[in-house]
Image (spheres, helix red, strand yellow):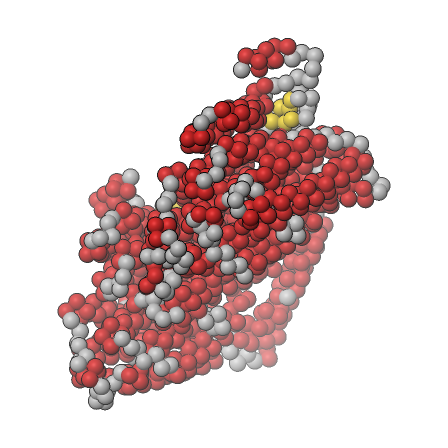
């Protein structure tokens, strides 16, 4: 069966099964590895690389075949999985997920090629391939249950990768990572079930976990929708991670093996930010709007906090880990700007962060392989011994800082631009983060690469070999290309973002009917209605417009009339 | 068999007996008796023979039960009762019967190697397993509280002896004694509950109780509530719900591992079967009275089990507390008091039967002679000593933690779904919180197996009294049990539809007297 799937994936000219293949090819590869002999690590490695690379090629085929102007889901597949619960194997890709899928496809073979495990290579590659399959599943799922399965499944391979092949305090880091994330997803599962059950109760149809059905036909009262959104948001906030739920990240990133760090930074941190866009905003537009101020604040705090803490780090890898906290703050900021530029920027920045931070982790890993230390204080003057590495480090670092001409700039500019139009002051404060990024990265670079080597090891530091140079070249090409000519990427992202924005505007302006179940619930939603003016007011104030008195009163009046409308609705419900 | 045939011919004046309906029960109990007597005549060397016979008996009984499935699911024929309406056969009882047979088969597979290793006599253990399972079948099919009590006692007495069946191990004797004393206590509660229910409703038959409660409104229902509470205590003890759980860790730790596998699966299944039948069916009109109590019981069980598991250092005790937490999850399904809830509880029980049997298969092997090595230390470096065993145990543990693509995940998902459908949102949240705490426990064991830092002494166990024991001889029957449990856990994890449909159809109904 697996062979047949593989064959159909490779040979199928119709591309109908492309998305299924993207998930199943690496999963099948992991199974094949299980059956192979551990005595031949070289062969295992080759097979693992081939499978990951095949998946990468499939993802590139997807990129080529993707209809640029179409913002809807493409290559959609939908099969019944568990009939009793309305759960299906539903896959689809749109502009929001497309580049994350490609990133997942490309980063894994690179990570496999770049880093050799220190021991037990068979399970190591097996877990990596399973991780690739699960990550693909998360980005492609159009069914909530399926999404959850993959979202949770991602934990297991990563847990083993950190715990078994990591450094130093690895078991602690692995456990912390697993439990933190599992806590979030446990809450999300309850939220998901509440959403599904209440929607089914309100519509009276069959129970379904289908994302699009739930987004379009959802009929939760405002209050419930907000509560369920919070359940989802908690899971995603932990996964991103958003300050103050970030504490698992530095440990996990630092103790993970190099390939694990690359994947963690490149792919896994995107699961949370992607979740916000695909499930948070899409399913709960009104609640997302309601919660946006909080996320904007947390995003800005994350940017500043991550940057400041990164500056203080003595360990190069930990520094890069904290820089991720800052970068992800930008992505959160852009996502919750809730406008076209902001969200497009957030998606672009997800890819950029994957490239630049992934490459940074690779470089730190290379340094560690040579010197067996990551302490900045023990590294100095490497530039003289390793000019090529220094050059690569410079480009990647500048991309991470967001220097114009490299990819980081494009994303950050779009995000700041989008945030500025919506909420001016957040953007102003967040822009400080760019300066701080320059501070911590340049300072670290200066201490590590400049000056004269203080020890024999640093003097004899080996430069990049052919393989390492080639791998870094892939990253640098991507970084420069997307920095100079981001248009093809943005063209593919924008239509889907436009659809999402339209969906948010359409759904969050209309007050969804409260569930007609009992007197108390009608009363509850009535209360929710009466809270509307406060919200509108908050939005007006927070939007940063110098709202004149007239504008304010106008907004208030509008809100009141709206609230009256709800009150009337509530009454009619009660009368029924 | 000729006797049976004769009986069915003459059964005219006495209460009608539907022999096909009681066949699974008879097929478990009667051959067990024959086996007991035969074992005293057969030479000792035939130990492996008993395992085969037990498995064959359980398989045949399960086969007959499955034969009944199509009959009770047939809309024209439907569920029926027999033996004067005291014994009901519906989808629920068939499902539970099959589950009990499965847990007997798995326990028997583990018992073979265990008895050889410990140098114990054979047949009694198998006989008691079969008898206990027959008690469970009675509980699942009981249509009368007295019959329920009979089933409970048959089930329990056999298990008390099973717990103490390792003659040379003090801990095993202690476990048997503890279990017996506390179990007898809880049986007394149960009996009181029956008496009070009878006092309140004037009947011990489930049909009578339900009819009475539906047709009458009690002005003072304190006697009924007291009866309900007592019955709940009795069942709570059997399924190890907090605060009636205190026997669990000691008994699990002391009893022979194959017996624990049966206790955690079979006894729990039977206990929940009785609980569901009495509360969901007979007392369904009083659900607003008992639902809050079960709610509190579920919260206490979920949190108590998970939190107490965290502080354990012995893997068997961890599993004991985790089995308590699992009981809490199943109580979620009971609390929902809906067909979805019951279906979810049955699915959970089915999934858990395999998970726990597989777990104790590994624990039994690792704890070696005398069950002496079951601390977390003994699991250190298992991945190096026996990678396959460690991998199987990991699958079981991850399934118990509720990781997707294992049956454990879908089991949890089902009960959460049922809880949310009955609007118990906070209970669902508590349950998932308990799942996270539980995950910590399971991960600790995985850490010990895979990530222990002392790579140096991996070849030898921490207690290297005997070099050959470190190699961990795994009998073929145990491998078979592990293969079955891992296979089912993963298969059902990927295709839960295989069981969800059956579990949904297996909702207990009130079986009216034979028409």
Vertical comparison of A445 with A291: above or below: below
Quadrant in the picture for the N terminus of chain A: top left
| Camera-side residue of B495 and A562 | B495
Say if residue B435 shows up in the picture. no
Quadrant hosting residue A537: bottom right
Quadrant hosting residue B377: bottom left
Say if residue B308 shows up in the picture. yes
**Direction from residue A98 to residue A514 in the image, left or right:** right
Residue A528, horizontal then vertical, whole percent: 64, 62
Residue A21, horizontal then vertical, whole percent: 30, 48
Q: Residue farthest to the left?
A: A466
Residue A510, horizontal then vertical, whole percent: 56, 58
* Residue positioned 60% across, 44% down in the render: B176
* Residue positioned 35% across, 53% down in the render: B467
* Residue positioned 22% across, 53% down in the render: A39
Q: Residue farthest to the right?
A: B219
| Camera-side residue of A128 and A344 | A128
Residue A51, horizontal then vertical, whole percent: 24, 52
Vertical comparison of A338 with B5: above or below: below
Vertical comparison of A410 with B317: above or below: below
Quadrant hosting residue A371: bottom left
**Direction from residue B104 to residue A379 in the image, left or right:** left
**Direction from residue B48 to residue B183 in the image, left or right:** right
């Amino acid at each position: 069966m697996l062979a047949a799937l593989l064959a159909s994936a490779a040979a199928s000219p119709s591309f109908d099964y492309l998305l299924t293949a993207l998930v199943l090819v690496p999963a099948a590869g992991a199974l094949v590895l299980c059956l192979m002999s551990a005595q031949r690590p070289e062969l295992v490695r080759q097979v693992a690389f081939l499978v990951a690379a095949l998946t990468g090629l499939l993802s590139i085929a997807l990129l080529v075949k993707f209809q640029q102007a179409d913002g809807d889901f493409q290559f959609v597949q939908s099969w019944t999985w568990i009939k009793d619960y309305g759960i299906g194997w539903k896959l689809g890709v749109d502009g929001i997920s497309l580049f994350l899928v490609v990133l997942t496809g490309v980063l894994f073979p690179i990570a496999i090629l770049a880093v050799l495990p220190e021991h037990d290579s068979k399970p190591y590659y097996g877990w990596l391939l399973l991780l690739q399959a699960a990550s693909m599943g998360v980005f492609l799922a159009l069914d909530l249950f399926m999404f959850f399965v993959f979202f949770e499944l991602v934990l297991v391979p990563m847990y083993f990768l950190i715990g078994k092949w990591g450094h130093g305090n690895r078991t602690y880091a692995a456990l912390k990572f697993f439990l933190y994330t599992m806590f979030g997803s446990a809450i999300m599962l309850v939220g998901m079930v509440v959403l599904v059950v209440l929607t089914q109760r309100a519509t009276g149809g069959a129970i379904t976990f289908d994302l699009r059905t739930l987004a379009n036909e959802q009929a939760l009262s405002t209050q419930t929708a907000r509560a369920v959104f919070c359940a989802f948001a908690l899971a995603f906030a932990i996964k991103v991670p958003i300050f103050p739920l970030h504490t698992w990240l530095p440990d996990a990133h630092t103790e993970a093996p190099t390939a694990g760090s690359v994947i963690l930074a490149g792919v896994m941190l995107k699961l949370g930010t992607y979740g916000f866009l695909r499930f948070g905003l899409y399913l709960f537009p009104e609640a997302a709007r309601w919660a946006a101020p909080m996320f904007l604040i947390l995003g800005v705090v994350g940017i500043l906090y991550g940057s400041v803490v990164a500056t203080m780090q003595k360990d190069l890898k930990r520094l890069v880990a904290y820089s991720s906290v800052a970068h992800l703050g930008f992505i959160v900021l852009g996502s919750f700007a809730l406008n076209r530029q902001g969200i497009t920027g957030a998606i672009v920045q997800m890819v950029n962060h994957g490239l630049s931070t992934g490459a940074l982790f690779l470089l730190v890993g290379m340094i560690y392989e040579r010197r067996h230390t990551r302490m900045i204080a023990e590294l100095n003057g490497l530039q003289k011994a390793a000019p090529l590495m220094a050059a690569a480090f410079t480009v990647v670092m500048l991309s991470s800082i967001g220097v114009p001409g490299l990819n980081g700039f494009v994303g950050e500019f779009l995000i700041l631009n989008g945030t500025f139009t919506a909420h001016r002051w957040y953007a102003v404060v967040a822009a400080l983060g760019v300066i701080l990024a320059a501070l911590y990265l340049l300072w670290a670079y200066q201490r590590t690469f400049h000056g004269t080597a203080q020890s024999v090891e640093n003097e004899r530091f080996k430069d990049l070999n052919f393989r390492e140079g080639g791998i870094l070249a892939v990253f640098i090409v991507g970084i420069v290309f997307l920095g100079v000519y981001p248009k093809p990427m943005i063209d593919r992202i924008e239509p889907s973002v436009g659809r999402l924005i339209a969906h948010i505007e359409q759904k969050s302006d209309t007050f969804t009917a409260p569930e007609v179940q009992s007197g108390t619930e009608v009363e509850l939603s009535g209360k929710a209605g009466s809270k509307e003016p406060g919200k509108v007011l908050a939005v007006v104030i927070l939007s940063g417009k110098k709202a004149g008195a007239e504008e304010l009163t106008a907004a208030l009046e509008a809100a009141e009339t709206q609230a009256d409308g709800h009150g009337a609705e509530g009454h009619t419900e009660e009368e029924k | 068999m000729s006797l049976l045939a004769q009986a069915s011919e003459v059964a005219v004046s006495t209460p009608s007996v539907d022999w096909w309906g009681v066949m699974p029960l008879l097929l478990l109990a009667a051959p067990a008796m024959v086996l007991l007597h035969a074992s005293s005549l057969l030479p000792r060397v035939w130990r492996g023979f008993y395992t085969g016979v037990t498995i064959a008996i359980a398989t045949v009984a399960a086969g007959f039960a499955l034969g009944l499935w199509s009959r009770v699911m047939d809309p024209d024929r439907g569920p029926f009762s027999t033996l004067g309406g005291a014994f009901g056969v519906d989808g629920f009882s068939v499902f539970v019967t099959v589950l009990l047979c499965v847990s007997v088969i798995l326990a028997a597979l583990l018992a073979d190697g265990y008895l050889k290793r410990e140098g114990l006599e054979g047949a009694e253990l198998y006989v008691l397993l079969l008898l206990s399972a027959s008690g469970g079948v009675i509980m699942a099919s009981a249509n009368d509280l007295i019959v329920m009590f009979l089933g409970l006692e048959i089930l329990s007495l056999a298990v008390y002896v099973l717990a103490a069946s390792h003659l040379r191990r003090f801990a095993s004797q202690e476990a048997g004694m503890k279990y017996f004393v506390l179990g007898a206590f809880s049986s007394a509660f149960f009996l009181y509950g029956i008496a009070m229910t009878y006092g309140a409703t004037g009947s011990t038959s489930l049909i009578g109780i339900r009819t009475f409660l539906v047709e009458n409104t009690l002005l003072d229902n304190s006697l009924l509530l007291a009866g309900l509470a007592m019955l709940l205590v009795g069942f709570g003890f059997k399924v190890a719900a907090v605060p009636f759980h205190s026997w669990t860790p000691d008994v699990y730790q002391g009893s022979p591992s194959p017996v624990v596998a049966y206790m955690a699966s079979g006894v729990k299944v039977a206990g929940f079967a009785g609980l569901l039948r009495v509360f969901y069916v007979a007392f369904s009109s009083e659900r607003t009275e008992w639902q809050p109590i079960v709610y509190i019981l579920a919260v206490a069980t979920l949190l108590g089990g998970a939190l107490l598991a965290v502080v354990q250092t012995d893997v068997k005790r961890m599993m004991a507390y985790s089995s308590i937490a699992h009981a809490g999850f199943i109580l979620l399904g009971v609390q929902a008091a809906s067909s979805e809830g019951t279906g979810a509880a049955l699915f959970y029980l089915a999934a858990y039967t395999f998970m726990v049997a597989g777990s104790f298969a590994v624990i039994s092997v690792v704890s070696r002679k005398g069950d002496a090595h079951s601390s977390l230390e003994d699991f250190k470096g298992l991945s190096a000593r026996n990678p396959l065993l460690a991998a199987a145990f990991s699958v079981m543990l991850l399934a118990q933690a509720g990781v997707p693509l294992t049956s454990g995940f879908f089991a949890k998902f089902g009960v959460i779904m049922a809880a949310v459908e009955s609007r118990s949102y906070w209970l669902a949240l508590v349950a998932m919180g308990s799942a996270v705490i539980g995950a910590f426990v399971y991960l600790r064991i995985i850490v010990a197996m895979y990530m222990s830092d002392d790579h140096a002494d991996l070849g030898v166990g921490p207690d290297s009294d005997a070099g050959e024991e470190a190699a961990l001889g795994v009998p073929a029957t145990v491998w078979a049990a592990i293969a079955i449990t891992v296979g089912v856990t993963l298969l059902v994890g990927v295709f839960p539809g295989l069981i969800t449909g059956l579990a949904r159809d297996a909702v207990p109904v009130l079986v009216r007297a034979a028409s």
